[in-house]
Amino acid sequence: MINLNNIEVRFGDFLALKNIYLDIKEGEFFTFLGPSGCGKTTTLRTITGFVKPSHGTVSVNEKDITKLEIEKRNIGMVFQSYALFPTMTVYENIAFGLRVKKMPKEEIDEKVKEMARKVDLDEIQLARKVAQLSGGQQQRVAIARALVNSPAIICLDEPLSNLDAKLRVQLRDELKGLQRKFGITTIYVTHDQEEALTLSDRIAVFNKGVIEQIGRPDDVYNRSATEFVCNFIGDINKLSREFLTRIGAAKIVDLNKNCYIRLERLYVNDYIDGRLSCKARVENIEYYGMYIKYTLDARGECLRVMERNSGNPLYDVGSIVGVSFDPASVMQY
């Protein structure tokens, strides 16, 4: 549906994006993920028309929209701050774009109320000023305002970043539910890995103006294409050459490469044929309820291990345990 072909964006002498190729499918929840300043928001703004590329084309349904005006692209936008009008009522905020189009009053009223029902805003809330609403309700107003014009695509630029952690998790679930209900093609920008992994059908990981990897959440996490993606997504241990040599991994992994392993791919006192193993001292314990994180010292090698909570007693700090892993789980770059 959406195609970016060899997009390049410059701001003066600064090359913000280079060689960006993207194909986003109809109805897909597609996330741009990366650290601040990596180019993800610039790519979003290139699609919406706020930024003009210095090279390349943006197409929707095989129609070139690279030079098309913003208002003619049929793309809804939800900004980080929601960009709502605080002195207007919820009704007036949702109706704003329809009034700009000079739609008949009766049609506006019908569309606003129908959209409000779809995002679970009642008539009492429609009559309130936006400033009187909770963060979650404001998010639904911003989404309703973006969707009421029946866009083919909706773009969301870090819409949860200003909320507290508990509300972010709640609204993340609501957001995915709304996207499924409407079946609308969604582009979502975030620096939060957990948001990206839980919400997305596919993810593009950005770094310094280029895309390092495009894939499903499990592909990006388990089969990171580059060392940057490997380090940016989730938590990970870097394994030293000395440690790998000491436990007999030299014939299995390439010691000339940088080697990493995910925390949950290490096992404490759990031995299976084919795994490499060693002894380690428990240095620290972090108890999270559903899982436990151990920090171990394997003769100078710091290993962090994430275990599901099985209900068994925790290992004490200072105790000696066995730690093992499958060498096939080592990621090499």
Image: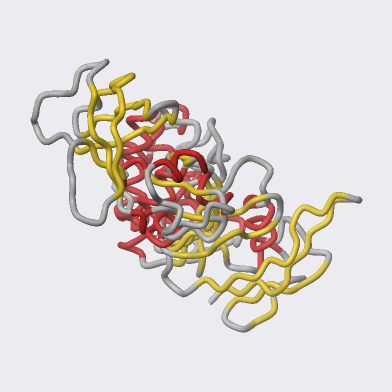
Nearest to the observer: residue 128 or residue 151: 151
Q: Is residue 235 visible?
A: yes
21 on left or right of 242: right
Nearest to the observer: residue 63 or residue 127: 63
Q: Residue furthest bottom?
A: 62
Labels in figure, total: 0
Residue drawn at (76%, 72%), measured in percent from left and top? 56
Which image quadrant for residue 155? bottom right
Q: How is the image coloured?
A: secondary structure
Residue drawn at (27%, 37%), measured in percent from left and top? 323
Q: Residue furthest right?
A: 13
Up-down: is 163 above or below 98? Answer: above
Up-down: is 269 above or below 319? Answer: below
Nearest to the observer: residue 238 or residue 5: 238
Nearest to the observer: residue 94 or residue 180: 180
Residue drawn at (52%, 64%), measured in percent from left and top? 214
Query: Where does residue 313 sit, x and y in percent of width and height?
Result: 10, 24
Query: Where does residue 21 sit, x and y in percent of width and height?
Result: 65, 70
Q: Say which quadrant the C terminus sits in.
A: bottom right
Query: Where does residue 81 sit, x and y in percent of width and height?
Result: 56, 37
Query: Where does residue 70 sit, x and y in percent of width and height?
Result: 69, 62
Which image quadrant for residue 102? bottom right
Q: Is residue 122 visible?
A: no
220 on left or right of 77: left
